[in-house]
């Protein structure tokens, strides 16, 4: 995937996180998750991440984070705690530590117990898997992302986006016992939902990543036929047509691609 497409993906994720973490109102609380579905917090895991992060941060950033934590500890109301955890999640994401951001997004989900909160926690953790982080950090984020998406899915088993996100986690950080699990999961989802453009676009991106341009073109043209205005599809096709030497189509789609 070229720089333009990485920026497209990154900006989409950051926008979603900014809208969520920046919200000052608490989502309507629904029935709490059963204890068996609430992930146990691995204190030593997050402590190690925080200690490592502290080595490269300015004192002002550390002091600010500490002040928010102190506010949360003193708060008796869940609303105030959620607001504090969202602020921490947003700040750590901006500082370039999505795994730590995911941890605080997870604290929001534990309190709110909503599909949206768990999905946001999973998405935040999953961003770690696309970056230049150590194997241990990615393992920490992968485990928690999968659990978060499973929790989100338990609220709404019909929401295919959670299944897509779980498959993408497996493609970004392939399980050692089954490195093909992610792509196989996406293919199965495609068989079950042949008209889902999100799945087709993800399969197209994976084909681009492995330099299977003809396969990518096939997937993306299928997606375009279903939704001619899908900007992700349009931008990806611009690159694919350029790669296969179709300059005219590449220019046409590049002009349509929203920067």
Image: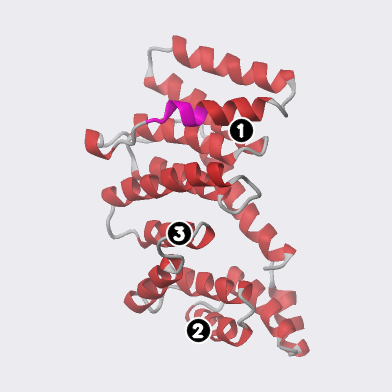
- Mark 3 or 1 closer to N-term? 1
In this rendering, the answer to whether 229 lies above or below 33 is below
Magenta extent: 41-46
Q: Can residue 229 be seen in the rendering of this structure?
A: no
- Secondary structure of the residue carrying numbered label 3: loop
Q: Mark 1 or mark 2, which has the lower sequence index?
A: 1
Q: CA distance from mark 1 to mark 2?
A: 39 Å
Q: Which residue is mark 2?
A: 222
Would you name the residue on which mark 3 appears? 176
252 sits to left or right of 81: right
* Residue 36 percent across, percent down from the top left: 23, 37
Query: In which quadrant of the rendered image does the N terminus lie?
Result: bottom right
* In the rendered image, the vertical position of residue 112 relative to residue 134, given as above or below: above
Residue at the spot 40% in from the left edge and 50% down from the top edge: 146
Observer-side mark, 1 or 2, equals 1
Name which quarter of the figure residue 77 lies in.
top left
Identify the residue at image location x=42%, y=43%.
144
Numbered marks: total = 3
């Amino acid at each position: 995937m070229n720089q333009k497409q990485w920026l497209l993906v990154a900006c989409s994720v950051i926008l979603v996180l900014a809208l969520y973490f920046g919200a000052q109102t608490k989502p309507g609380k629904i029935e709490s998750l059963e204890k068996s579905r609430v992930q146990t917090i691995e204190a030593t895991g997050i402590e190690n991440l925080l200690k490592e992060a502290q080595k490269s941060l300015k004192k002002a950033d550390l002091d600010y984070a500490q002040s928010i934590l102190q506010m949360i500890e003193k708060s008796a109301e869940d609303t105030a705690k959620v607001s504090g955890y969202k602020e921490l999640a947003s700040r750590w994401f901006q500082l370039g530590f999505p795994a730590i951001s995911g941890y605080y997004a997870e604290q929001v989900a534990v309190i709110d117990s909503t599909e949206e909160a768990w999905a946001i926690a999973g998405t935040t953790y999953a961003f770690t898997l696309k970056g230049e982080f150590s194997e241990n950090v990615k393992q920490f984020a992968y485990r928690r992302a999968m659990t978060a998406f499973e929790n989100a899915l338990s609220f709404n088993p019909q929401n295919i986006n959670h299944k897509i996100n779980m498959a993408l986690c497996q493609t970004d950080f392939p399980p050692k016992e089954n490195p093909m699990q992610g792509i196989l999961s996406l293919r199965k989802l495609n068989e079950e939902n042949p008209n889902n453009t999100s799945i087709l676009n993800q399969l197209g991106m994976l084909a681009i990543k492995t330099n299977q341009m003809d396969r990518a073109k096939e997937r993306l043209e299928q997606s375009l036929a279903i939704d001619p205005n899908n900007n992700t599809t349009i931008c990806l096709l611009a690159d694919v047509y350029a790669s296969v030497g179709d300059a005219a189509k590449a220019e046409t789609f590049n002009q349509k691609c929203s920067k």
